[in-house]
Amino acid sequence: MSHVAGMQKHTSAEVVVIGGGAIGSAIAYHLAKQGKDVAIVERGEFPCETSKRCDGHVATYDSPPGYFSKLCYAGLELFPQIAPDLPYDIHFEPEGLGLLIDDERDMEAAISNYEGKLKEGAPVTLWDQTELRLHEPNIADRVLACINFTGDSKLNPMRLTFGLMYRAQEYGAKIYPQTSVTGISLQNEKVTAVRTSQGTITTPNVVLACGAWTPELGNMVGLDIPIRPRQGQILVTERVQSLVGKNYAEFGYVAAKGGRKRLSATPEMEAYGVAFVTEPTESDTVLIGSSRRFVGMNSKPDAAVMRTIAQRATHFFPAYRQARVIRSYAGVRPATPDGKPIISDTRISGMYVASGHEGNGIGLSLITGQLMADILEGKTPVFDIAPLTLNRFSASDK
């Protein structure tokens, strides 16, 4: 960051974005680029919390055909457009992702998924066992087929967040790290200011983009925002070469994400929400996941979860037994009851929510920034956001 603003005791902004991860940074980027006077407030350092505790998938494979799948594709399409405008190489690589089917009982559902994606116009191909082995000689014999999502990509999430934040600042955004929000002032159910540990920012608009911490901020103004922290854990291997050619995940990941019982899952896999996913990095290490479990705000790796993830990885790629795990990390993802994010206004004038993306936050960051900028500019959003409103939850926003 070229310069971090020091907050005066009283300052002002047209929009205050609370949260300095990929989502908040993308919102600030789009708003500042359009000439808005925007401030971004983050209680820690940049990049914060989940955006530095995740993988770099820009994914469409994990969403069944339908609205959310189309939203993910819309998000993916923005990366080649915006990446050249960022000051850092975010290591955006559209190398595709393979969804592996290892159980004959899943084949019908997998083929249905594949055909549904084709009908949406998605760039997908189906590899049988022979073709898969030509691409991945280290794949286990038990793997029957692979749906290849040729458009899916990966990037470095920390470089993305830094790049968006840096460019937003160059466009005029004010950046306030190490700044905690202590309150949000209202007058006649309208936002008037954000009170922080460093001073007060007078503003008519606030965007809550603070991930799993969003409900805490919503409570300050009496908003019930149904987001729960769901922990995800990832292993990192030593530097290895040629064990795996690109990103892969198991078909069971789609079921695990949707909270559905999987036919071949062990009790440990069910308990920890473990499903195989892997990502080779630009530094020749490999990221291996994943887990999904509700353990509050706990972001500490768990040894039993690590073992279960490692065992599942070798189920698909036995050669992973050759690689040492050098570290593990965990982060809390903001999960909503229906698995879709909240990108919405609220009953309080000037109060907005952009959160609840869970494991799709990186891939949906740019489209979320664009949608929120459209809302704040009074424009028709570039993508239908009706299914993403806060008031879709009957007990919320009352």
Image: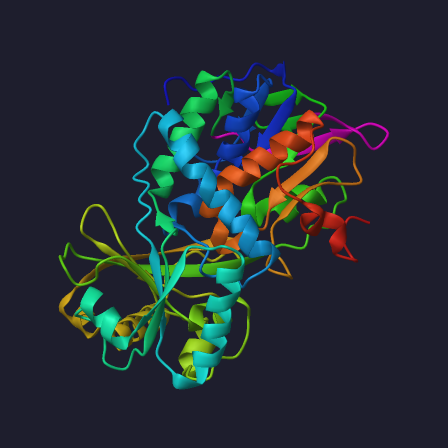
Q: Quadrant of the N terminus?
A: top left
- Residue 252, image quadrant: bottom left
Q: Is residue 336 visible?
A: yes
Residue 136 appears in view: no
The residue lying at 52 percent from left, 29 percent from top is 179
Image vertical order of residue 162 relative to residue 167, above or below: below
All told, the count of numbered labels is 0
Check the image and report above or below for 110 versus 362.
below
Question: For residue 190: magenta?
Answer: yes
The picture places residue 99, in percent across and down from the top left corner, at: 37, 66
The colour scheme used to paint the residues is rainbow
Coordinates of residue 81 in the picture (x, y in percent): 42, 32
On screen, residue 352 versus residue 115, left or right, reads right
Q: Please provide percent x and percent y for residue 19.
A: 54, 36
Residue located farthest toward the right when viewing the structure as drawn: 188
The quadrant where residue 228 appears = bottom right
Q: Which residues are magenta?
A: 178-193
In magenta segment, residue 16: no
Q: Is residue 134 left or right of residue 123?
A: left
| Residue 384 image point, x, y percent | 66, 44
With respect to residue 340, does 103 lie above or below? Answer: below
Q: Report the residue at 42% width, 71% height from top.
A: 251
Identify the residue at image location x=18%, y=51%: 284
Left or right of 102, for residue 338: right
Residue at 70% x, 32% y: name it.
184
